[in-house]
Amino acid sequence: MLKYLATRLALTIPTFLAVLTLVFFVVRVIPGDPATAALGDYASQEAVEALRERMGLNEPLYMQYFQFLGDLARGDLGKSMITGKEISGMVKQVLPYTLELTLSAIIVGALLGIPIGIHTARNSNTLVDYIGRITSLAGLSVPAFYLGILVMLLFAIKLKWFPAVGGGDLSDWKSNLSHLALPSLTLGLIMTASVTRLTRSAMLNVLNEDFIRTARAKGLSERVVVFRHALRAALVPIVSIIGIWAANLIADSVLTETVFARPGLGKMLVGAIMQRDYTALQSVMVIYTGFVVIINLLTDLVYSLVDPRITH
Amino acid sequence: MSSKSLGVVEPTFRLRSQKQRVIHTFLRNRTAILGLILTAIILLIAFFADNWFVALPQGKEPTPLLAHYNPLLQDTRNRLSPPDEDHLMGLDSYGRDIWSRIVYGARVSLLVGVSSVAIGGTLGLIMGLLAGYLGGLVENTLMRVVDILMAFPSLIMGLMVLAVLGSGLFNMILAIGIVLSPTFARVAHSATLSVKANEFVEAARAIGASRMRIMRVHLLPNILGEMVVLASIWIATAIRVEANLSFIGLGVSPPTPAWGSMIRDGTSHLFDAPWESLYPGLAILITVLAFNLLGDGLRDILDPRLQR
Amino acid sequence: MKRFVIIATLLATVLILGACAQPTPEVVEKEVIVTQIVKETVIVEGTPQVVEKKVEVTKIIKEVVTATPVPKEPVVLRYADKAADLGTMDPHFAAATNDRNLVDMIFNALVRYKPGDGTQFEPDLAEEIPEPVIVDGKQVWTFNLRRGVMCHPSEQVPAYELTADDVVFSLKKSANPDTSAYAGDYNGMTVEKVDDYTVKITMEQPISPVLFLPKVADYAGGFIICQKPYEAMGAEEFKTHPVGTGPFMFDSYSPQEKVVLKANDNYFRGRPLLDAVEYRFMPELNSRELGLRSGELDVINGAAEGQWVRRMNQEDGIRVDVYGVGEVATIHFNLTVPPLDDVRVRKAIAYALDRDEFLALFGEPVAANVYSAVPAQFLPGGLTKKEVDELGLEYPLDLDKAKALLAEAGYPDGFSLEVVSSERESYLKNYQSMQAQLAKVGIDIKINTVDHSSMHKLIRQDVNPIVIYVAWRPNADVYLTRFYHSDSIVVTGAKPDTNFSHYTGIDDLIEQARVELDPDKQIELWKQAQIKLLEDMVSYPLQYQNQVTARRDYVDYGHELKSVLALYPQITENTRIVK
């Protein structure tokens, strides 16, 4: 186990290097640069040139690359090429919003998705199953953007239960939670769809296994059979899809963040691409890759927890 | 009956019965049949869109069966008109007939949805299966590659493909496929780990079955169900991601219709002309429904446990 | 199943609890008389003196009454802009609309465009707009500064009175390409301090007021920053901690979320009626709209869409303002690329296009047609519809003529072109409309959509045979110089800029007009230049796209809205909330 952890941690270094190298070169290959983006179309050519020089964009590419890796090794994420603010500070301000949204969406998604999945599997090809499947498919087809607007119309405009827009004040839990409710509901419902589908499928697999028949034959109550035996065996793929959602939600909830006007890592990432803020993009990618590595490691560890037959 | 005759008869009997059972399982599943019919209709529309169903952009003007307006024709003075008898689904922000654009747009959207999921699914399945079964160095390498791929959100992956391979529909499909592959790889990996621990895999190894055979005969069928379900789930995502990538210049260019881009265009008139994004959204929903019902049917057939 | 029910109930409870977490206090309106101290400069026997005046202003204040008394709510205006995040608040770099909006509230200039009316100048930090005098062939402008103008306090430097030193420092900063994006506008200008309250600006080459005043007005390089805090914190820090003299001062910045500005108690025109401005970054139109409708926002940046304007105006308690200045969309033809090098082909395109087709995509009253490179609606020197019509240069829609011209040029079946377009609607609409219209005469245009930054880079690398460009420029000279002077030719010009057409035919007219001191003659020269542009069909002017903002009806900007260069309704010391 310890050896496994050590190997995994050692392997994070090449993972990081690969991601960062790719990002570093790709953003510099696509047209446009931060100097032009920062100065706008009215700026004179000489001002753009002067800014490029100050940003260090005229240095040879390999110099910029090693400079970046060197700074990173010292734990320095650098400054935004656009606002000149420390990126670590910006990330610190934005990250809590992302984490609370990801976490609450996963809770909603898992709490709704797994029970519905089990229920539809146990009643497969009945009316309940059809309804469950079709609503979850609707969830899959609705863009987060659309659902977000619908949720806002209902809960913010009509019922006036929650505020429509903004991230809320992090230091005031009431304001923070009320601003979190609608976005996490939106993302949670979308996640519910795929968790339901996968749970249903995994449960159907397991419910036909010999050991379930054996358990039933032993006269165990249906609840024990379903939750102790079947669910446990079906949980591995479910855990893996939740892990994938966790990783995706951190960077890919841009649309939800945008609709609800919340700050977030995903928005920061897209903003950095659009502004060609190379340093900000690289740093966000460092952080995001870190999350992916950690989430995947945790998921892999959970596998052997839920299914003791899996050993690392 | 002698044991010899049994030996001759049994295989043919089993074979026929298996085929029959497969067909029987499928036919008994009414929802799967519905899925099959729907899928067939959608594919038919997409495949023959420009010959049969829509009045086409340039020149060719056969009598269209479904849509009476050229999907590219702009009637700007009546833009954003609500649906009426003439324009079943209304007009978009350029005054183009939305129904025609949905029919014609089925081509790009289905192509993107199905082929990118096929690419991503196959790629992910191979990586996950190999990693899960072989373990050790192979597992470590492959799953770390998956980590790397997972670290790229679709927009960045799109930009990478654009920078390296340039624009074009196939490149976009490839980009979406790569973006989807880690999901398949991780689920395939976890499912393989689970199945690998079963006695029958042990048994197969004990009687000297080759690794290839164990993967193909014992592991693959057992995880294929989850893969098919995942694939049918992710088609909707793939169709929608198309919009985000055509907007950075990867994939189809305007005015070619595609459902994802239609929704995207419609979002800026969400309250003024909800039909502009609602109908392409419904088109995606129906498609996903069709593929999912079909996928569930396939899952039941593919699941060896259900045949026991 | 039971568990499922329990979990669902739990979830519902959490949601409802969250909803209850919002207090539902009672709201009581109160009229309060506030005494404001207004500093005014009065000329007593020829010497200016600062006099403090007490003015009583009635404010209607919303008070929130709950069980426990809550301190009085500050009056905050919540403005949502379509930007995703802040760029910079250094006014000499501010280029994005949101950045321009913010610096407009924080800084002043020697002179300013009248609030809400960008066609008129009035004194700002200067006591009056001076008349220039010619000394040794050079033009000298002497500005007397207002007394008692205070720089905002900052962490590093307490509030202090703005003097000629700050003005000289600031204008020199604007002229330096290392510290300003607009350095090019300040060539041939010298700025000197005469005494603490007098600044002398010398122009190598005399120019007319129409061209001089924008350089020292509240737009781009003309904004005056405070020297001491700038030097104390450094250029990088200043971008997010701006210090000026305006009605509002910087309070805080939360990335991707908002910038908060608070009232400058010592503002020289009097303390603002608002206590603070919350400037939110909300790129999504629908959420801005819902935020306004739910009452969480007071003013939002709207959609450039006639239908939207009409619908929102019908909403209860919401008013939409449509005003200038309008950014002008123009089709530029590259005269060096076949077949566009043939004037008949360009004229054919012009005859094949219908401005009203383009216009319909935006809808009244958001956009209006433009007939010359410089928009006559906003700037002196532009040509009106009537003028071009009389000259026979309107190029009205005439497909037969277009086809005949194409045939004459040797393209009876048309030709194909490939262009890149920004993903932004103001561009894509025009490109797609042009594509559909030109298809009728056999010209096949392939549009490759790219993101906005990429487009700007690519068109400056001359990839597009046809460029549609949407821009606002502060005067006719800048429009003509940047887009049509040979020095500005993309890639190959002496100072590569935005002359996408590679045109060289009006250099002399632009240069003559620039140094012409008689305003009427100057305008005449500009008009001649644009007539030449139309005769050669160098570019086809399309439309200007107005600004659209929606507000709750209790917001009173404090001025009439005609045109604003900063592209927002302008929030000043007189802006108030009347509830």
Image (spheres, rainbow, N blue to C red):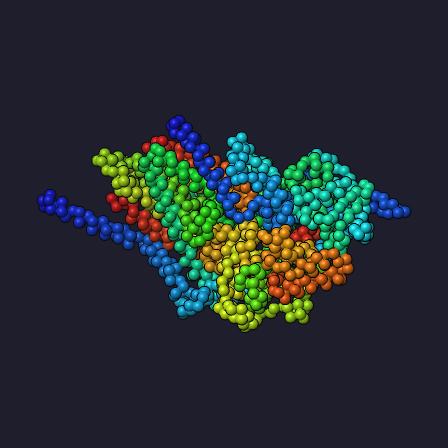
Q: Residue at x 37, y 33 (%)?
A: A304
Residue C402 vertical placement versus C187 (above, below): below
Q: Residue at x 46, y 36 (%)?
A: A17
Q: Is residue C211 left or right of residue C300?
A: right
Q: Residue at x 41, y 39 (%)?
A: B146
Name the residue at the left extreme. B2
Q: Position of residue C482 (x, y in %)?
A: 64, 55
Q: Position of residue B161 (x, y in %)?
A: 45, 47
Quadrant including the C terminus of chain A: top left
Near-viewer residue (B228 or A194) = B228
Near-viewer residue (B133 or C193) = C193
Near-viewer residue (B245 or C323) = B245
Near-viewer residue (C435 or B34) = C435
Q: Residue at x 61, y 53 (%)?
A: C493
Q: Is residue C59 left or right of residue B146?
A: right
Q: Position of residue C273 (x, y in %)?
A: 73, 46
Asked if one can make out residue C514 in the rendered structure from this viewpoint, the answer is: yes
Residue B155 vertical placement versus C335 (above, below): above
Q: How many marks?
A: 0
Quadrant including the N terminus of chain A: top left
Asked if one can make out residue A181 in the rendered structure from this viewpoint, the answer is: no
Q: Is residue A53 left or right of residue B53?
A: right
Name the residue at the top extreme. A2
Q: Position of residue B84 (x, y in %)?
A: 49, 66
